[in-house]
């Protein structure tokens, strides 16, 4: 509780600005909030935080209780399943009371084939301790963490502001010395040469676009630019193949790809182009012996696999043909097997093909709803792979799978302390019907015994952009809702990739409204099937899912009691009209280019949450953002909340800004738990469960 009572929420009063596109003039009375360095902006955000704290002060006890529940269910001193690479087992461990992970390795013992799971590991070497790096800092994030093939060097990068502009350093793992080598403003991703003398890394431009690949000679000040991408629609990435034979430079826009390779034992060589870009064709490569495997969508909407020669890349030879309805998401090569990650009927899957064979088998799993994928697997010469598995009721699990015998060995399941029993909960697949007749899947979990008479409170989550799928997943924090009788559901709306590439295509550009109407249809389906009622339903989404939250608040406010919007993209038209902002140009292939197209401009303006705030009754709204976010800038939710108060003043709107964090919010795990406890307490306050 604040020592003084604040009379009311802050009022934003500054001079408006105007913009004109395609003959349309718009007055933006809150554009001044875009001036991050202006003391008036900071004062406004701090006043909003003070008002939010006062308005939620009655939830302080509940917040603390939920935080203790999350903490009490989490095994604070823990470690990941070690992964073998070369002569070492690599893993990350956490210690009670410490915010960040500690990255370690131990030598592989003679004859040792199974990962050592004992907490006490003789010969442990700490490679990097996040707690030491973060000491005295409000924020800490690790970008690159890359050990050289010989195991002697570690490249790592750090961010202490939350703006995802990292500083790259190199550590000698033999002596423990951190070299004087240091590069600022680098992006995620790096790759080592075969002999560990050369490191490849990426830098960003003024718009935060990764566009340059550099070659750095370890122990020197030598940095050589080897590739620059001039087209502002494209991002550049760099990586080392699992075989450790090639450095891969991939260049991608939202819908087009181009790949170059450099032999890892010839780091000074010029990059070799695999296939030049062709608008609308996406492809990626994986090295496998004498060939590069190519996952692509050339005349294959849900993707196919071809191959081309390593010695003379050119012709694509078909290997796995296109099968409509089965979306191929990646191909991972091992010395004697291929593993295909795929998606079919709204579920993820893994398909195994032995080298030299056309026969394949799909891994089988017992639950009706689940998420499965490859996990790490740095070794190329192996007959087994590691996978991750989870569901709405099964904690994150790690298995090693023998690719020959098909046997699965559970290495670890995430501990859930206390009295958690999976059999106390049930998961379901429901379906909604969108206005155009499309059936939209819903994944749902509830504690057994929840009545289906419309009386149960519910939380509905959604995203629906970039072909990013929100698959069923387990959450310790979510138990604090489920055990209070709250139903949790995920609406797998169009714009995501849950039902294949067409699902994505039907929820982007000039079909974006399908994302919003799908979500409303899902909410109505939950009410119709008596899982909940509109006055007991809260919607939640973040980033592009925050755009979804703002849109559904405008078009169907009566369908929800509350809306939780995290780092929400609620002023998309203003942002996409400004090419100088981070990410804008690269986003035109996702949303359209409203600068050049009057049709796109009109379409975006018709759904933009900020543009369409009207004098109507809105559900209770909480917007959470971060001052240093480079993906969705803080001013979007700040402007949105200000306009909601001005246009529809009878509603209850709160804005909470992390003043020292980025897109993912607080960086330390305890801080993140407190943030989630704040959010869940607000949700429960809206839902008022019995």
Image: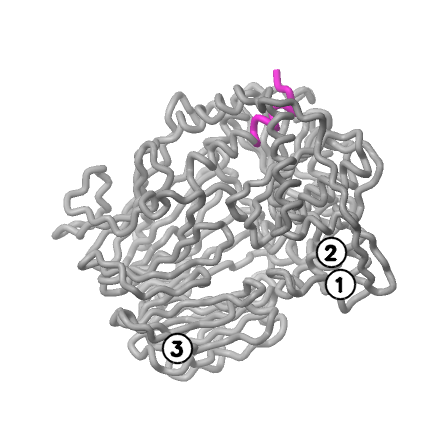
Q: Which mark is residue 172?
A: none
Contact check, label 3 and label 2, Cβ < 8 Å: no
Q: Which mark is residue 594?
A: 1
Looking at the image, which residue sits at the far right? 23
- Which residue carries the number 2 mark? 573
* Residue 564 image offset from top left, x and y in percent: 64, 36
Question: How is colour applied across the structure in the image?
Answer: one colour
Res 319 visible = no
User: In percent of the image, x 43 and y 77: which residue is there?
Assistant: 225
Label 1: element kind: loop
Q: How far apart are labels 3 and 1 at the CA level?
A: 38 Å
Question: Was residue 101 drawn as part of the magenta stretch in this picture?
Answer: no
Q: Is residue 271 above or below residue 469?
A: below
User: In percent of the image, x 61 and y 66: which residue is there?
Assistant: 255
Q: How far apart are labels 3 and 2 at the CA level?
A: 38 Å
* Residue 601 image offset from top left, x and y in percent: 79, 60
- Which residue carries the number 3 mark? 224
């Amino acid at each position: 509780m604040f020592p003084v009572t604040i009379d009311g929420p802050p009022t934003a009063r500054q001079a408006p600005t105007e913009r004109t596109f395609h003959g349309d003039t718009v007055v933006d009375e809150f554009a001044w909030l875009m001036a991050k360095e202006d003391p008036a902006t900071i004062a406004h955000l701090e006043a909003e935080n003070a008002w939010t704290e006062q308005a939620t002060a009655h939830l302080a006890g509940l917040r603390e209780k939920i935080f203790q529940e999350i903490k009490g269910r989490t095994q604070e001193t823990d470690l990941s399943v070690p992964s073998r690479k070369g002569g070492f087992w690599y893993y990350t461990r956490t210690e009670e009371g410490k915010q960040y992970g500690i990255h370690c390795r131990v030598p592989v013992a003679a004859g040792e084939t199974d990962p050592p799971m004992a907490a006490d590991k003789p010969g442990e070497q700490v490679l990097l301790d996040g707690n030491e790096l973060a000491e005295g800092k409000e924020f800490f994030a690790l970008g690159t963490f890359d050990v050289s093939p010989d195991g002697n060097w570690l490249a790592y990068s750090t961010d202490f502001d939350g703006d995802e502009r990292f500083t790259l350093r190199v550590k000698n793992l033999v002596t423990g010395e951190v070299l004087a080598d240091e590069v600022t403003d680098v992006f995620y991703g790096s790759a080592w040469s075969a002999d560990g003398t050369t490191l490849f890394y990426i830098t960003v431009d003024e718009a935060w676009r990764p566009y340059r690949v550099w070659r750095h000679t370890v122990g020197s000040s030598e940095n050589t630019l080897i590739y620059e991408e001039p087209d502002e629609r494209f991002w550049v990435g760099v990586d080392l193949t699992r075989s450790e034979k090639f450095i891969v430079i991939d260049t991608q826009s939202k819908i087009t790809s181009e790949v170059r390779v450099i032999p890892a034992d010839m780091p000074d060589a010029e990059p070799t182009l695999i296939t030049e870009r062709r608008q609308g064709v996406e492809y990626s490569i994986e090295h496998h012996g004498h060939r590069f495997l190519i996952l692509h969508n050339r005349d294959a909407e849900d993707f196919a696999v071809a191959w081309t020669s390593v010695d003379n890349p050119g012709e694509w030879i078909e290997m796995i043909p296109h099968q409509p309805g089965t979306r191929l998401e990646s191909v991972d090569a091992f010395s004697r097997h291929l593993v295909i990650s795929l998606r079919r009927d709204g579920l993820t899957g893994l398909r195994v093909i032995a080298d030299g064979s056309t026969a394949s088998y799909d891994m089988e799993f017992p639950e009706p709803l689940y998420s499965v994928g490859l996990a790490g697997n740095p070794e190329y010469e192996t007959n087994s792979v590691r996978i991750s598995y989870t569901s709405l009721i099964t904690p994150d699990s790690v298995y090693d799978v023998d690719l020959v015998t098909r046997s699965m060995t559970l290495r670890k399941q995430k501990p859930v302390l206390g009295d958690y029993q999976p059999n106390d909960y049930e998961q379901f697949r429901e379906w909604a019907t969108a206005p155009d007749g499309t059936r939209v899947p819903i994944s749902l979990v509830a504690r057994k015994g929840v009545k289906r008479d419309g009386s149960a409170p519910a939380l509905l989550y959604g995203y629906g952009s970039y072909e990013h799928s929100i698959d069923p997943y387990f959450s310790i924090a979510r138990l604090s809702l489920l055990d209070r009788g709250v139903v949790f559901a995920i609406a797998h709306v169009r714009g995501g990739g849950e039902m294949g590439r067409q699902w994505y295509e039907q929820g982007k550009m000039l079909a974006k409204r399908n994302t919003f109407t799908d979500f409303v249809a899902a909410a109505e389906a939950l009410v119709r099937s008596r899982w909940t009622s509109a006055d007991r339903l809260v919607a939640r989404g973040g980033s592009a899912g925050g755009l979804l939250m703002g849109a559904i608040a405008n078009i169907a406010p009566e369908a929800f009691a509350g809306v939780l919007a995290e780092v929400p993209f609620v002023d998309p038209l203003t942002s996409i009209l400004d090419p100088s902002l981070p990410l804008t140009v690269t986003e035109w292939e996702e949303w359209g280019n409203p600068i050049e197209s009057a049709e796109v401009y009109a379409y975006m303006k018709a759904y933009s949450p900020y543009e369409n705030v009207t004098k109507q009754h809105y559900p209770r709204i909480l917007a959470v953002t971060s001052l240093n976010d480079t993906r969705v800038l803080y001013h979007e939710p700040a402007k949105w909340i200000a306009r909601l108060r001005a246009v529809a003043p009878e509603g209850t709107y709160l804005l909470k800004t992390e003043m020292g964090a980025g897109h993912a919010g607080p960086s330390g795990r305890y801080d993140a738990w407190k943030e989630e406890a704040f959010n869940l307490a607000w949700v429960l306050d809206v839902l008022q469960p019995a």
